[in-house]
Image (tube, rainbow, N blue to C red):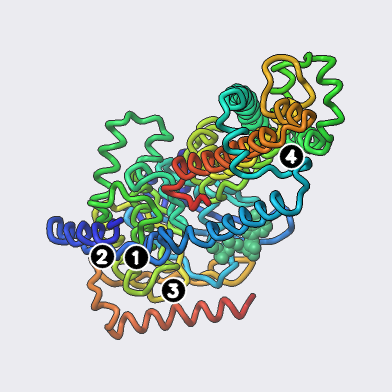
Amino acid sequence: MTVTAPAPTNTQTSTTDVLLDFSNVEMTFPDGTIALHGVDLVVKRGEFVTVVGPSGCGKSTLLRIASGLETASNGVAQVGTDRIGYVFQDATLLPWRNVTANVELLAELHGESKKDRAAKAREAIELVGLGGFEKHLPKALSGGMKMRASLARSLTLDPELFLFDEPFGALDEITRERLNDELIELFNAKQFAGLFITHSVSEAVYMSTKVVVMSGRPGTIVETFDVPFPPTRDPEVRFTPEFAALVGEVSHALRKGHGNS
Amino acid sequence: MTTISNETTVGDGIDNVEGHPTPELPATLSTTPAKKKKRGLSRWLPPLLVFLGIVVVWYIISLFVLDPHLRFLLPLPQDILFKGFLDPLSFNALMVALYQTVIVAMLGLAIAIVIGVIWAIAMSQAKWVERSLFPYAVILQCIPILALVPLIGFWFGYEFPSRVLVCVMIALFPMVNNTLFGLQSVDKGHRELFKLQGANRWTTLGKLSLPAALPAIFAGMRISAGLAVVGAIVGDQFFRRGTPGLGILISNYSSRLQGEQLFATIITAALFGVVVFWLFGLLGRRAVGKWYDFT
Ligand SMILES: Nc1ncnc2c1ncn2[C@@H]1O[C@H](COP(=O)(O)OP(=O)(O)O)[C@@H](O)[C@H]1O
Ligand SMILES: [Mg+2]
């Protein structure tokens, strides 16, 4: 897939840095459900965009269109790479494969050699802090560890565009915050284009360079916030007045958008 | 099993070595002590007592209720043991028949498994194939096989092949049905995971659908195995040419009023059924027990 998007307004980014470019995207399902309506969204390399919105507003649909699982019924949905990582809400590990074999799966499906995929898996497993658990089956892992394995599996693709669909939604607060920090670290190291969905406003503000607020169904983008905090997030930033103010603004926009539906 | 404590140690290890935060403790495994199988007396005593009760009632009926000349209806247990099982002549006939029945049942089962799995895979590949073929699986299940027996005899003779065929026909449906169910119950998220990587249908079948269907396939195998034993004995009683199996032996002994041998043969057939059921349960646990709670 190649990007034929119009030249971005920012002159410092070349066209290849635009990894996701949605313009006026609509999604109407065969049963008549209008999930998305007039969505414009650009995600560039080095951006971590978080989408918040009421449940059922079409957030997952947005990612499914970006990944190619679903085709937009109207508008233009362009994606500038075929290296797309996609982390679902469920870890979706194959229960009969141990951690290593699960992490190797994607490379295996692409027909890579045993040696290559073993090397990739080893590196990814180390990156997510699962070293020592290579031989464990998913059922012997906690929710957080399963999510790490799922993350490692996507990392083996070395994604340029990384989609996350409420990946930490089912985890407890402490685990979630730890994984937030590790994901930020990964993002800062790899500088992919991130599109992250969450229903937690404070997670959104903490994680991202940009927060996008969607309205209730049919989902459309009601407001976008740039996040001013430095890329290497200090967990303490959560306790600053600036953070609280931004969370407040986003929450407000969310409530307003919800009311419109 | 000490996996839990192992994992804890390993988790602490990476924290120290790599500076990674310790991953959360793993979920508790399903092998907590409370769930461990009870062994010993408390497990075996109740069924043993029931068994003793049955033996006592048996003796009472055999000794005091039945006229001596009607004792073949329920022979004394020791007579079944010594005349029915251990008498060299009876023992020989029993073993030959058992061997024959085992061969017929297992061959029929093997064929049913192969055909059943292939049939189900074919149906899982496209809705129209399923719509075309599934009704025939149901019909096969619904026809009383006994009604077909004369026809099978006409076509395939009254020996070994017909006996195997009856086994196959009786054992086929659970294999088809369970395999299809297994193949179709693959998690949607897993399917999309494969689809996102552009995996073709054969890769998806080999690496996803079939492994995911294994628990259902093994459950089907256990049911089919039991049915194959029934099929072998039933088939035997209709197709009486060639080496006799347990079924022929049973009808011979009953027509000759040889109660001790008859009981010994019936007990052997029952034990064979139990062993097969247990064996295929064991096989299932061996194959998928590590990741699936196969019971
Ligand atoms: N395949 C589908 N067919 C019909 N409706 C669908 C389908 N997928 C999702 N929807 C509907 O579209 C809306 C948006 O769904 P989704 O994107 O999953 O929402 P979110 O992830 O924001 O909770 C929901 O109302 C959902 O019921
Ligand atoms: Mg969703």
Task: Assess whether mark 1 and mark 4 are in contact (beta carbons under 8 angstroms).
Answer: no
Q: Which residue is drawn at 45% across and 64% down?
A: B42
Q: Which residue is drawn at 50% across and 35% down?
A: B199
- Residue A124 visible in the snapshot: yes
Is A97 rendered above or below residue B153? below
Task: Assess whether mark 4 and mark 3 are in contact (beta carbons under 8 angstroms).
Answer: no
Callout 1 amino acid: Thr
Callout 4 secondary element? helix
Query: Circle 4 sits on which residue?
Result: B72
Query: Circle 3 sits on which residue?
Result: A200
Is A242 rendered above or below residue B291? below
Is A121 rendered above or below residue B114? below
Disc number for residue B160: none
Callout 3 secondary element? loop
- Mark 4 vs mark 1, CA separation in Å: 90 Å
Q: Mark 2 lies on which chain?
A: A
- Mark 3 vs mark 1, CA separation in Å: 15 Å
Callout 3 amino acid: Ser
Query: Circle 1 sits on which residue?
Result: A209
Disc number for residue A231: 2
Q: Mark 3 lies on which chain?
A: A
Callout 1 secondary element? loop
Q: Between tags 3 and 2, which lies in front?
A: 3
Q: How many marks?
A: 4
Q: Mark 4 lies on which chain?
A: B
Within the displayed image, which quadrant is ligand 1 positioned in? bottom right
Q: Between tags 4 and 1, which lies in front?
A: 4
